Structure formats: C-alpha cells, structure tokens
Image (cartoon, rainbow, N blue to C red):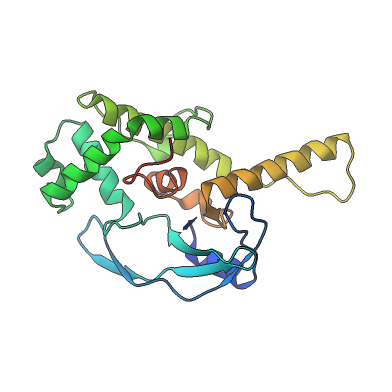
Amino acid sequence: MITVIDPEAARRALATRNLACPEPGCTGRLRVWSKARPRPVRGRDGRVQVIRPDRGRCRACSVTQVLLPAFCLPRCGYRVEVVGAVLLAAADGAGYARAGAACAVPTSTVRDWIRAVRRSAPALIAHTSWLPPSAPDPAQAWPTPSPRLPGLTAALHALGTAARGLASWLTRPDPPAHATVTGIDYLALIARQHRHEVLRRLRLAAPSSGAGHATPWELVTILTAGRLLTGVPG
C-alpha cells in the first residue's frame, strides 16, 4: 500500500511512471494496474463516500500497490478523522458509548479502536520519534487530551507532535539537483537523496501536491503507513 495526499496528482505520476516502488531494496517504477475494489468510507457527518483507489504494479519486482488516500485506513469503513475524534474523546474522559455517539460509531467499534491504539502505544511512540519536536501551530491546533488513559494519551501526544513536524518537513522545497558536484552541491545531493529515502519509508506518493492541505489526522495516516489501528512495526 502507498499513501496518497492528492489522488489526482498521484494518478498522473503513476500514468507517467514517476512513482518509485516502496518495497525495500527495489529500484523499480510502478505502472498503471487495475483499480482496487470499491470501498465505502463514512465521514463525521454520516455521509458515505464510495472510492475505488488506483493500483500500480512494479515493473521490477511485480508487487502491486494500492494508492490509498490519506483519509482512509486499510480495512476501516470510516475516515481517519472519525477515528481521531473518537480517540481524542476517549482520552478526554468519554466512555465508549459517548465517544462514538458524536460520530455515530457503534460502541463495539469504539472499544476495538481504543484497545488497538493502547496496545500499540509504545510502538506508535517509537515509530514517530525520528521526527524533531515542533512548536504548536495555531493554524493546525491539536486538542490536548487528559491523562485518564496513560497509554492512549501518550500515543496521541506523540502522534500530534510528529504530525506537526511532518507537515513542516513536507512543505519544505525539495533540495535542488545540480549538474556539477562541488563540496556544497554534494551536501544538497545528500539532502535530496535523504528526502527521497524518507518518502519511500513513509510509503508516500506525490507529496509535493497537496502536502500543505493535509489534515492532522491524514498526516497521522502517513506517519503510521495506515497502521494506526493495526499496529506499526516495533
């Protein structure tokens, strides 16, 4: 799976074979493959959007990748903002029923989400610690949960801090490529290669388009490679 901020930009990049395969050790490029199956996704207003993500197949390793929009989580029928609202409500002290009531999410589903994040909290915190801390951005406020559920609260704080850092990092201009390699140019080349390697690790496609408009919870999807509810690698 590859996370996509701007599906249209990613589709164009896929059509022109400008998407690199995210599989470790593979240097191939993706080409257009058949569409993924349709999936309904429910938003906070209760409306259901049916999407059918693009798919690409690597010409080198033959692995197929679904280009999943950042507002989606794999095997979850709700937008990530719905999941986030439920998690923050629970951290603020709401019980399962009240946490899900505002977004019309069944209590059993809320319970599963909260337990999943609490169970993987140490891995989530470790997984996001590579990004440098950033000061709160007033334009992208992140609610501060109470310490009622320590594991959940710690994970949400870590994700919020990392999301702000990622937003700042993604909106930086890509280091320029130079025809000649001097001492200074070589540093720029290293920075450019590092950026591309991080994007590969994040499994993120076409980040330059729409990166500044990604919501905090879409950034969380990117940070966790869509595994907020299924557990990131330890």
Task: Please indicate whether residue 210 sits to the left or right of residue 100 in the image.
Answer: right
Residue lying farthest to the bottom in this orientation? 34
Residue 128 horizontal/vertical position (percent): 46, 34
Task: Please indicate whether residue 97 sits to the left or right of residue 18 in the image.
Answer: left
The answer to whether residue 52 is above or below residue 168 is: below
**Residue at the image position 53 percent from the left and 32 percent from the top:** 131
**Residue at the image position 41 percent from the left and 43 percent from the top:** 220
Residue 171 seen in render: no
Query: What is the quadrant of the C terminus in the image?
Result: top left
Residue 13 seen in render: yes
The answer to whether residue 93 is above or below residue 67 is: above
**Residue at the image position 44 percent from the left and 30 percent from the top:** 126
Residue 5 horizontal/vertical position (percent): 48, 56
Q: Which is more toward the observer, 227 or 13?
A: 227
Q: Which is more toward the observer, 159 or 138?
A: 159
Task: Please indicate whether residue 43 sits to the left or right of residue 102 in the image.
Answer: right
Task: Please indicate whether residue 202 sits to the left or right of residue 172 in the image.
Answer: left
Residue lying farthest to the left in this orientation? 97
**Residue at the image position 47 percent from the left and 63 percent from the top:** 67
Q: In which quarter of the image is residue 161?
A: top left
Count of all numbered marks drawn on residues in the image: 0
Residue 101 horizontal/vertical position (percent): 12, 48
